[in-house]
Image: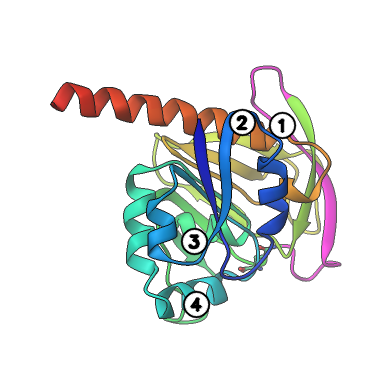
Amino acid sequence: KLKVGVLALQGAFIEHIHILQRFPQVSLAIPIRTADQLSSVDALIIPGGESTTIALVAERSGLLEPLREFVESKPTWGTCAGMILLANEATQTKQGGQKLLGGLDITVTRNKFGTQAPLHINHVTTKSGNDDVFPAVFIRAPIISRINSLDVEVLARLEHTIGDTDASAIVAVRQGHLFATAFHPELTNDDRIHQYFVSLALESLRKRCRIIQQQI
Ligand code: GLN
């Protein structure tokens, strides 16, 4: 069974916790505010919110380094601001002010939908085997502007154009144990993306166990 933490420094964390509590494979879903709490979970969600603020609060509470270590090896999903924090590179950030955790070999552009109304519902096509269409909520969302490694798998694209962002823009990716979505699945009544993350987390934990056993 899986213990999942949701980073709770700022932003939309409680919604994730409520959804996770419905899954039989999840034994615990807790908000994370300290390094001790972080070390007690197997997987992490970094929620949407404001990535500069989340990074600042993490730094002040001594969580930046523990978070960087965590995302190096353990399953982590970043939604929106969380996706920015997981990116190795972000553009349109305050000069020198934006700390990232990194891990995903992608470049994101912040606030891509910022000149539009604050909320967009679009459809994204997800590659879960049968091209499912998922209703996606975007709130001043970043977009994945570049993929910088062959290890990054594109999982979802926009179905329709938003402002100057073309349909087929990349809005979800996976690289090994890291997963990121530009949209907010915790704000829709559809838990397929959470289901996907729970399966990804269980799968990468099983792999980790096998590797550790082989080393012993
Ligand atoms: N615009 C926010 C940022 O740059 C992200 C918005 C969100 O998480 N909904 O951090």
Badge 1: few (under 14), some or many (20 or more) residues near its Cα, within 10 Å? few
Reading the chain from its start, which is encountered first: label 4 or label 2? 4
Which amino acid, by three-letter code, is at mark 4? Answer: Val
**Above or below, comparing residue 110 to residue 61 in the picture:** above
- Magenta range: 113-131
Q: Is residue 116 magenta?
A: yes
Reading the chain from its start, which is encountered first: label 3 or label 1? 3
* Closest to the observer, 124 or 212: 212
Q: Quadrant of residue 11?
A: bottom right
Give the residue at mark 2: 196
Numbered label attached to residue 192: 1
Numbered label attached to residue 57: 4
Which amino acid, by three-letter code, is at mark 3? Answer: Leu
Q: Position of residue 78 (x, y in %)?
A: 55, 52
Alpha carbon distance from label 4 to label 2: 29 Å
Q: Is residue 134 magenta?
A: no
Alpha carbon distance from label 3 to label 1: 23 Å
Numbered label attached to residue 105: none
Alpha carbon distance from label 4 to label 1: 30 Å
Q: Residue at x 58, y 29 (%)?
A: 25
**Above or below, comparing residue 163 to residue 114 in the picture:** above
